[in-house]
Amino acid sequence: GVVACEAATWMAALGSSVTLVVRGHQLLARTEPFAGQAVLAGLRERGVTVLLGTSVEAVRRSDPQASGTGRVHGGPVTLTTTHGELEADEVLLAIGLSPRLDDIGLSSVDLTADHVTGGRLPEWLYAVGDATGGPPLTHWGKHQARVVGARIAARAAGEVAWEPDREAPVPQVV
């Protein structure tokens, strides 16, 4: 996804040898195919090895040692993938996010996760970010949070809240 591509770019720019393991058969599958192809070409030009259609099945580190700071150090990391083994000094995970809405008590107010992600909420309940089912982009989630904050403040003041166009395109740069 976007975060993995961005991390691969800056890690390569800092001089690291980078291998990007992608489960899907194209990069940035939620974008237009040409966008994923352009980013793939750019990553490869920067020396990033990109393995498409590859899943990680196991990860192990030889001689792991706890650092006391939440990090584990030690020997190299071995990743067993669907296409063989890879060895690395470190692993950065960018595995995607899905909102966990099934266990937050929506049924107690006769709602389901589909109500939230589909934007079908009562006027007293708000959702922002990944929970809305909209574009999974940080700047979009921040925009939604500002809109919801303004909406709550307007209602508290007895004013009419501004409603953004839900169908407006959301810009994205990778």
Image (cartoon, grey):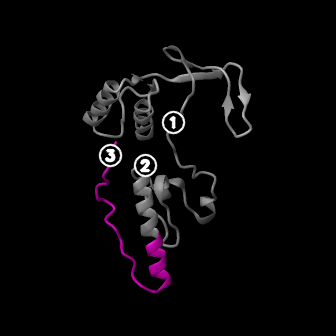
Residue wearing tag 1: 95
Q: Earlier in the sequence, mark 1 or mark 3?
A: 1
Between residues 21 and 8, which one lies in front from this camera angle?
A: 8
Question: Is 11 included in the stretch rendered in magenta?
Answer: no
Label 1 vs 2, first from the N-terminus: 1
Q: Are marks 1 and 3 in contact (CB under 8 Å)?
A: no
Q: Is residue 9 left or right of residue 73?
A: left
Crowd band around label 2 with a 10 angstrom C-alpha radius: few (<14), some (14–19), many (20+): some
Rendering quarter of residue 118: bottom left
Q: Amino acid at mark 3?
A: Val
Look at the image and tell me in which quarter the C terminus lies: top left
Q: Are marks 3 and 2 in contact (CB under 8 Å)?
A: no
Identify which amino acid the numbered label 1 is placed on: Ile
Q: Which mark is residue 136?
A: 2
Under mark 2, the amino acid is Pro
Q: Quadrant of the N terminus?
A: top left
Residue 146 as seen in the image, left or right of residue 73? left
Q: Residue at x 28, y 38 (%)?
A: 32
Q: Which mark is residue 153?
A: none
Q: What is the spatial separation of the Cα atoms under label 3 and label 2, in whole angstroms?
A: 13 Å
Task: Give how far across and how far down residue 6 sits, in percent.
Answer: 41, 38
CA–CA distance between discs 1 and 3?
19 Å
What secondary structure prevails in the magenta region? loop
